[in-house]
Structures are given as structure tokens and as C-alpha cells.
Amino acid sequence: MTGASRNMHRVLDLFCGAGGFSLGFLLEGFKVLMGVDVDPLVAETYEENLKVEVLCDDIRGLHSLDLRRLLGDVDVVLASPPCEPFTGANPKREKEVMDRLYVDEVGRLFLHAVRIIGDLKPKLFVIENVPSILEGSLRFHIKEELMRVGYEKIHFNVLYAEDHETPSRRKRVFMSNFKLTPQPSSKLIVVEEALKDLPDPSEDNSMPNHSIKPLPSWKLKKVAKLRWGENLVLYKGAGRRALPNWVRLHPLKVAPTVLGGSRFIHPYDNRLLTVREQARLMGFPDSFIFRGGVDAQYNMIGEAVPPTLSRAIAKEALRLLRECPA
């Protein structure tokens, strides 16, 4: 998939998931040494697609010395700690913002990423998460934690996936020891363009991850009444937020943000998008195959860093490493 490496910058990917973050770096010639993830299913998907080993382990019990013995020096550490403790889409997140980082057991995984980054001392680190991870005093404490492990300058880079040829909207913060300023593309890819040239899954589902998920007749009747942009479901987020789901996509617009629990209605057909169509909305190539059950596949896609955005970050990382080789 990656071709010959054009550089020897060595990458470790923490909370690697199915591999969206790593894929962009591989495509830009970085040498991805290893992914780390606790989920065996996403580890299988990552390894089969990227041909890179995954250490399937809980980061809380992972010692940096073991990583150094396995990998040697690491130039870049990528990390995508779980966003559930921080996102407004989670109705059960801690009310006190600091508890999301220091009390919530899943939120504390972020601190383990910081620990490993501090021990391995990469030239560049990039930690991805939802913008709400910077609410209240969280920004100050995250900066303090990263400075404490040896990085003097911390940048909170807010990037939009749709600016980098991703057919869905996605605003994320990428925390790094460098300011990341990837050049936005002049091209905006809308739903219709993203989904074009796929075979009709009702007639041909030989393409991997491109089968229709059946719906009961009562739900199909409701789906048939939806216009572009309308949603069938509202679910409760944090506080009193009501968030739309089962949205019928507008063919001439960029899709809404793809989440693990997102389900979209095809713009023209009365059905859910297939997993392959959902993957296209996140910039995954058709050669990327997702393992496991259908819901697990949807979740992997929604929790990924879009490879299209990751590749733009990787280009920027390569420029920074060339300018600051030491």
C-alpha cells in the first residue's frame, strides 16, 4: 500500500484504532514502526491493511522502556486518546471539567499518552482529540502536563477535515510541540462526488464492506419521508443538547461529522449508507477493508482520523522535521 519509504522518520501510533492516522503518514513515506491499541478487532484491521504490527495491550500497563527496547528511537509519536470523556455528545461525561482528565478512568488515558511521549522524547508529537478537550482550565493543565515531560512549546492546532478533501465535516484539535499549518485544498468534495462510481449494493455487493444493512418496514416508511438534511432520530448529548442522527445526506453538500454512532441515509435511496460509503465520507480508500460486525465497522470509521487529513498533517510534519532535524 505504501510503496518505498521516501524518508526514514520513525513513527509510533498510540490508540491507533483501525489506522486512519497512521495511513496518512505511511502514504507520505514515514516508517510506521508500530500501533498500540487495546481492541483486538481494530488491531486486526490495522495490521491487515497497513502491514504494520500492533501491540494489542492496555496502555496503562505499558512501560516506555519496553517500547524503546522493541522500537529503538522514535521520531514521531501520534496519539488519539478516547474522546468520550470530553465530548459534548456524551451525556455521562463528568460535570467538572478537570474530573474528565484526572478522575474519569478513560480520560486519564490521555495522561498515559503524555507519559510515553515524555519518556520516548520524539522530535514531534501530535495528539488528536475533540475541541471540547480544551474547555475551561483543561487547556492550561494539558499544556502544563506536556511541559512537565520536557516540551517547552505546546500548540493547540484546530483543523477542519473538509479543508483537506474529506467529504465530511470534522473539527478536531491536534496538540503538538510544533505549530501545524497544513495548506488547505482548494477543492471541496461533496457527498455526491464522494459516493459516485460505487456499484449499487442492492444489485452487487461483491465489494468488501458494501452490503445494505436491513431495516424493519416501519422504519423504512419513516426513512422514505425524509428530505435532504432532515433526521429521523435525536439523541441526548451532554447537558440538554439534542443531537441529530439518521440524517438524509444532501448530495451537493459536505456530509455532517461522522461519529462512531452515526448512521446516514443515502441521498437518493431509502436505506442506510453501507460501511464502504461511510468510509468514503472519511477519506478511506476502497482498498481499506474493515473487519468484524457491521456496527463495529461503522464505529472504527467514526472514531478514526480521516486519512485525507492525516496525510496533510504528515506533509506538514515532514516539512517541520526537515527544517528542525535535531
Image: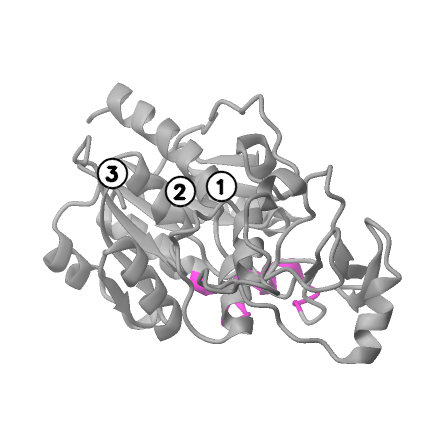
Q: Which amino acid does the dot numbered 1 rest on?
A: Phe
Residue found at x 44% / y 44%: 307
* Residue 162, image x, y percentages: 60, 36
Q: Secondary structure at mark 2?
A: strand
Name the residue carrying label 2.
126
**Region in magenta:** 93-109
Cβ atoms at labels 3 and 2 below 8 Å apart? no
Q: Quadrant of residue 320?
A: top left
Cβ atoms at labels 1 and 2 below 8 Å apart? yes
Q: Which amino acid does the dot numbered 3 rest on?
A: Phe
Most extreme residue toward the right is 225
Name the residue carrying label 1.
174
Residue 5 shows up from this direction: yes
- How far apart are the two marked residues, 1 and 2, measured between alpha carbons? 6 Å
- How far apart are the two marked residues, 3 and 1, measured between alpha carbons? 19 Å
The magenta stretch spans residue 157 = no
* Residue 105, image x, y percentages: 50, 72
- Residue 15 is left or right of residue 325, and the answer is right
Residue found at x 30% / y 34%: 28
Q: Earlier in the sequence, mark 1 or mark 2?
A: 2
Name the residue carrying label 3.
30
Pick the front one: 298 or 199? 199
* Residue 166, image x, y percentages: 55, 39
**204 shown above or below 164:** below
Q: Quadrant of the C terminus?
A: top left
**180 shown above or below 129:** above
Residue 107 shows up from this direction: no
Q: Which amino acid does the dot numbered 2 rest on?
A: Val
Pick the front one: 165 or 55? 165
Crowding at label 3, few (<14), some or many (≥20) Cα neighbours within 10 Å?
A: many
The magenta stretch spans residue 106 = yes
Q: Secondary structure at mark 1?
A: strand
